[in-house]
Amino acid sequence: MPFPSPFHRWRPHPWHGLTVGDRAPEVVNVYVEMTPYDAVKYEIDKDTGYLAVDRPQRFSSQPPTLYGFIPRTYCGDRVGALSDTVDEGDLDPLDICVLSERPIERAEIILSARIVGGLHMVDGGEADDKIIAVLEGDFVWGNARDIDDLPPALVERLRHYFLTYKMVPGEDDLEVEVDTIYGADHARKVLQASIEDYADLIGD
């Protein structure tokens, strides 16, 4: 077997080395950081590209869906400008939650997901949008095209998770709120803004 090409000798950095996807903004690539079974919060280490432990979850709350980010996105000034309440993004890749009928029990994988909406979350005075998507080709959720195609109880479960996952006993002022639930059209605008913010940060 010939020695592999030097371009395939190392895996790409999930944030910079992967692409948004050829069918964006409707369907995007997703790097999964967490599954619904994780009692520890994992997050990509931006310097190395490895998945790192951010913190153990303090309570029994677990993410209701797969959770990760869209490669080559960044929440900066353009994402902040889409908010009615704050002026800047959280300076991280754009977060995304993905519904899958079949259990996916491991993180650090790549998948394709169709954007259907999102949550406008404000964390510490910064826009921290959570895009909501469905696994491409999923036999239960795959036909969803907008947030109204999902059960309201499921969307509320996501909203509740993000309002409570940073709770600390004895501290009431988390400075976290989810003030808007939006559909696919606005979610695609957030994605496009994050792609442009990334280009400003890294360059074309």
Image (tube, helix red, strand yellow):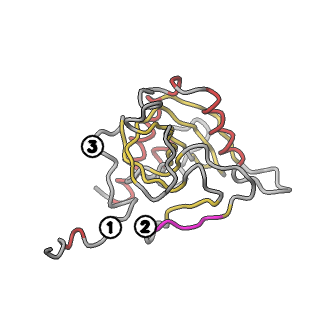
Query: Residue at coordinates 46% horizontally, 35% vertically from top-left?
Result: 187
Of residues 63 and 167, the one nearer the viewer is: 63
- The residue where tag 2 is placed is 49
Give the x, y percent position of residue 67: 53, 49
Of callouts 1 and 3, the N-terminal one: 1
- The residue where tag 1 is placed is 11
- The part of the image, by quadrant, that contains residue 57 is bottom right
Q: Secondary structure at mark 2?
A: loop
Give the x, y percent position of residue 117: 50, 33
Query: Residue at coordinates 49% horizontally, 41% vertically from top-left?
Result: 102
Give the x, y percent position of residue 196: 37, 47
Of residues 194 and 149, the one nearer the viewer is: 149
On screen, residue 136 versus residue 121, left or right, reads left
Q: Secondary structure at mark 1?
A: loop
Q: Secondary structure at mark 3?
A: loop
- Are the residues at dot 1 and dot 2 in contact (C-beta closer than 8 Å)? yes
Query: Residue at coordinates 56% horizontally, 44% vertically from top-left?
Result: 65
Q: Main secondary structure of the magenta part?
A: strand
- Are the residues at dot 1 and dot 3 in contact (C-beta closer than 8 Å)? no
Of callouts 1 and 2, the N-terminal one: 1
Q: Which residues are magenta?
A: 49-55
Q: CA distance from mark 3 to mark 2?
A: 22 Å
The image quadrant where one finds the N terminus is bottom left
Q: Nearer the viewer, mark 1 or mark 3?
A: 1
Residue type (three-letter) at the residue carrying disc 3: Asp
Of residues 112 and 82, the one nearer the viewer is: 112
Give the x, y percent position of residue 135: 43, 39
Residue type (three-letter) at the residue carrying disc 2: Gly
Q: In the displayed orientation, state which residue is furthest to the top.
A: 148
On screen, residue 89 versus residue 40, left or right, reads left
